[in-house]
Amino acid sequence: MLFGELRQRGFRGSERSVRRLIHTWRENTAPAPVWTAKPPITARQLTSLFMRPRHKLTTDELADLQHALDHCDTLRELEALVTGFAQMLRHRRGQQLDDWINQAKASSIPQLRGFADGLLKDYDAVRNGLTLPWSSGAVEGAVCRIKAYKRSMYGRANFDLLRTRVLAQ
C-alpha cells in the first residue's frame, strides 16, 4: 500500500528498498537518551571563576571549579597564579609583584612566563598601577573619544560611527 502511494508520487526505487527503510525505522524506535549530565565548563567560564572572589561564587560554580581543579594539575597551578594576580589588582598590593613574577617565571605555563616577561619590560608602570590610587581611566576615555571624532572627520569611519557622531550633536 505505501509502496503504491510512493510509486504514484514518482518514486523510482524498488519495493525492497522501501521495506529496508521501514525496517530500520522500526528498529530505531527507542526514545532518544535524555542528556542529564551538565555540559563541560568552557575556558571563558573557567576564567570568570578564577577572577571572581571565592565568596561571590555560587555553590554550583564552586563545585564546577573544584571539579576542574581536581582533574588537572596545570589548572591548579594556573588558578593559583591568576587568583594571586587578581587579588593584587583588587587590593592594590603592588609590593607583592616581585614574588608573583618569580612564581610565574618558575611555572610550567609558557603563556604566564611570557606575561611575566612583559610585566618586567614596563615594571615601574605596572608596580605603580598596582600600588597607587590614581587612575588614567578618564584620560584614556577622552583619548578614545577624540580618536572617534578624528575618524569621523577624516573618512576612516564606517556609517554607524558617522551616524552616531551626527545624531549626537
Image (cartoon, grey):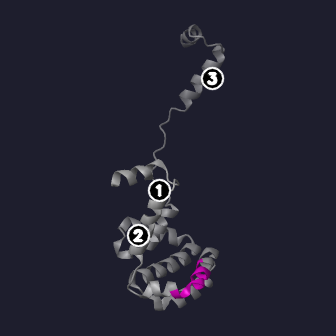
Q: Residue at x 44, y 65 (%)?
A: 146
Task: Give the percent coordinates (x, y) of residue 136.
Answer: 42, 78
Q: Which residues are magenta?
A: 115-124
Q: Residue at x 45, y 78 (%)?
A: 86
* Residue that carries the numbered disc 1 in the rendered image: 153
- Can you say which quadrant of the picture contains the C terminus? bottom left
Quadrant of the rendered structure where residue 133 is? bottom left
Q: Which element type, helix, strand or loop, lies under badge 1? A: helix
Q: Residue at x 43, y 51 (%)?
A: 162
Q: Earlier in the sequence, mark 1 or mark 3?
A: 3
77 over 18 or under it: above or below? below
- Point out the frontmost of discs 1 and 3: 1
Q: Amino acid at mark 2?
A: Ala
So how many labels did they put on this image? 3
Q: Is residue 106 visible?
A: no
* Residue that carries the numbered disc 3 in the rendered image: 20
Q: Are marks 3 and 2 in contact (CB under 8 Å)?
A: no
* Residue that carries the numbered disc 2 in the rendered image: 142
